[in-house]
Image (cartoon, helix red, strand yellow):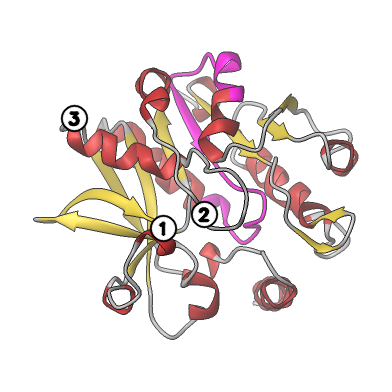
């Protein structure tokens, strides 16, 4: 059975990050194409169902313009309440058995990696399948901001954000969450309401984070599958001008290879 019959991509594009004031970072150009268009075009290559793109009121029109003439379904997230809040807005429109969650500020993913995660999810029977990346000196300036994956006896038990972890412990936690997920739709629909809000310490209200589903799944004894990344550059995200310049370099080298 083709992936398109049973997998629905959700693209949470309702963030407020920017590199240039007044302009969503998601519409910054990468080789004459907006960043978010790079990501959504990748989903077309993998032959998945048309994605649900979650937007906000501030940058929604910019996102729609960037994705003009691409088959997308747009859903608005009315309040700034986190990544789980974004997925919750999209869930009523999902009829497929599974969901792929891919963030539009991470344009270095490859079709091969996405297909690999989907295959793992379908073959393992997990309620959550996720990518993981080992931390070392390479790309540390970006990856140090990612949540850390915790394990007990080899099994994933939870993901904690850096602000939830004592600073003295952070250097010893070397497995990070690059936020590429597959979920069982039915399980997620029943579980997402159990997520408790977490403060990001940025002055905004506490948010409901999608990564907290991992701890819930673990506590229920549900299966969580892990796909370690061999090419760490795929997990790079864009939050700052430095990140943007870094990913331009990575994509340029990839094109030249």
Query: Residue 88: image x %, image y %?
Result: 54, 25
Does residue 225 lie above or below 71 as drawn?
Answer: below
| Mark closer to the observer (1, 3) | 1
Instruction: Name the side, left or right, on which 28 lies relative to 11.
Output: right
Contact between marks 2 and 1 (CB within 8 A): the answer is yes
Mark 3 crowdedness (10 Å alpha carbons): few <14, some 14-19, many ≥20 = few
Please give the name of the residue rendered at 19% of the width and 56% of the height, measured from the top-left corner. 151
Q: Which residue is mark 1?
A: 161
How many numbered circles are shown? 3
* Kind of element beneath mark 3: loop
Name the residue rendered at 90%, 39% in the picture: 65
Question: CA separation, marks 1 and 3?
Answer: 21 Å
Figure quadrant of residue 133: bottom left
**Residue at 77% over, 47% down:** 37
**Residue 189: which disc?**
none
Choose the circle earlier in sequence order: 2 or 3.
Answer: 2
Quarter of the image with the C terminus is: bottom right
Query: How much space separates mark 2 and mark 3, taking CA atoms?
Result: 26 Å
Residue 57 found in image quarter: top right
Residue marked by disc 3: 220
Which x, y percent locates residue 76? 73, 27
Label 2 – label 1 distance at C-alpha: 9 Å
Asked whether the viewer can see residue 9, the reply is no
Range of the magenta residues?
Answer: 89-112
- Point out the tag, 1 or 3, that comes first from the N-terminus: 1
Q: Which residue is mark 2?
A: 200
**Is residue 36 toward the left or the right of residue 194 in the image?**
right
Residue visible at 37% across and 18% down in the picture: 190
Asked whether the residues under the numbered discs 1 and 3 touch, taking CB atoms below 8 Å apart as contact, a structural biologist would say no
Closest to the camera, between mark 2 and mark 3, is 2
């Amino acid at each position: 059975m083709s992936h398109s019959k049973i997998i629905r991509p959700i693209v949470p594009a309702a963030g407020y990050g920017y590199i240039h004031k007044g302009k969503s970072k998601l519409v910054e150009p990468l080789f004459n194409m907006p960043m978010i268009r790079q990501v959504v075009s990748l989903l077309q290559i993998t032959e998945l169902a048309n994605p649900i793109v979650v937007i906000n009121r501030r940058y929604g029109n910019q996102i729609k313009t960037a994705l003009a003439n691409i088959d997308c379904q747009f859903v608005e997230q009315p309040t700034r309440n986190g990544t789980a809040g974004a997925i919750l807005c999209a869930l009523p429109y999902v009829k497929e058995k599974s969901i792929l969650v891919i963030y539009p500020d991470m344009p270095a993913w490859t079709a091969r990696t996405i297909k690999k995660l989907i295959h793992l999810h379908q073959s393992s029977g997990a309620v959550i399948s996720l990518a993981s990346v080992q931390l070392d000196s390479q790309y540390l300036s970006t990856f140090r901001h990612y949540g850390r994956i915790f394990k007990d006896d080899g099994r994933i038990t939870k993901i904690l954000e850096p602000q939830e972890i004592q600073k003295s412990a952070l250097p010893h936690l070397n497995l990070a969450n690059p936020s590429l997920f597959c979920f069982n739709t039915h399980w997620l629909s029943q579980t997402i309401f159990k997520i408790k809000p977490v403060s990001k310490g940025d002055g905004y209200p506490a948010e409901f984070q999608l990564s907290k589903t991992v701890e819930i799944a673990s506590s229920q004894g549900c299966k969580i599958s892990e796909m370690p990344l061999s090419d760490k550059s795929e997990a790079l995200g864009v939050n700052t001008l430095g990140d943007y310049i870094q990913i331009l370099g990575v994509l340029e080298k990839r094109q030249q290879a």
